[in-house]
Image: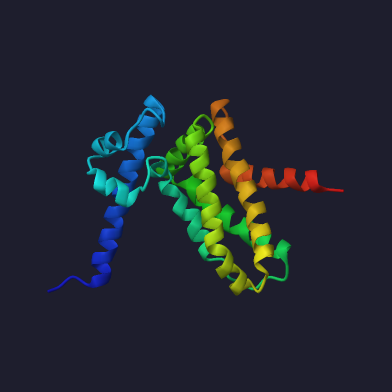
Amino acid sequence: MTTPVAAVEGLRDRRRRETSIEICAAALDLFEQKGVHGTTVDEIAARAGVSPRTFFRLAGTKEDAVFVDDGRFAAALAEVGEPCDDIAALLAVLRGEFARELALLDADARARERFLRVRRLIAHESALLGAAVRREVTSADRFVPGIAQRTGLAELDVRAALSAAGLEMRMTLDEWARCYDDGETSSLVDLHREVQARFAAALRP
């Protein structure tokens, strides 16, 4: 009896995900101990128990190795597709998608810990900050044409809404890391709402 192709592909995806998480954990440990510049790809691969070839196939660069959980937010963008009347309507949809993913992240203890460690490192490692911004911009650009087509909005409108929602997300995550360093425990969803409220207050005439 042969195993269905879908089951085989699902197993491969699961193993790839598990290996990526192991690489991420190894990179985080080493970055926290030695810094990004003081860590080599070979060291990360050795600690994760994989070959450098596997590392490059799954992670790309040592900086990108720690962003294993970013896929959830990219997947949220891929699902945006309802027709929208204007930028404000699209921004509301994007906020809803991001809030849902933040709630899921809050409920996943292991992913939450990984994500928090990454955000705390970003505050002190310029190489990781650069990688984070690059990934954010690249991901947004990748989804602009599709979202524009599905929502019926101009690409400039989509870029504007994505930029606003992305800035709110970045501020939420940065504040989350700052609160942790100050000994405060904060809900990502609550912080996201607070950041939106602060933006609204700042833009009020």
Q: Quadrant of residue 149?
A: bottom right
Residue 117 in the image, given as x and y percentages of width and height: 45, 35
Specify how the rendered protein is coloured. Answer: rainbow
Q: Is residue 200 left or right of residue 150?
A: right
Q: Residue furthest left?
A: 1
Picture residue at 26% right of the left edge, 48% below the top: 54
- Left or right, residue 77 beside residue 36: right
* Total tally of numbered discs in the picture: 0
Which quadrant of the figure has residue 12? bottom left
In the picture, measured across the screen, residue 3 lies left or right of residue 105, that is left
Front position in the image: 103 or 170:
170
**At 30% from the left edge and 36% from the top edge, which residue is drawn?**
44
Vertical relation: 52 (above or below) 77: above
Q: In which image quadrant can residue 47 be found?
A: top left
Residue 58: image x %, image y %? 32, 51
Residue 86: x, y in percent?
73, 67
Q: Quadrant of the N terminus?
A: bottom left
Q: Is residue 147 left or right of residue 203?
A: left
Residue at the image position 64 percent from the left and 53 percent from the top: 163
Is 28 drawn above or below residue 190 in the view shown? Answer: above
Up-down relation of residue 84 to residue 21 (above or below): below
Q: Residue at x 49, y 31 (%)?
A: 125
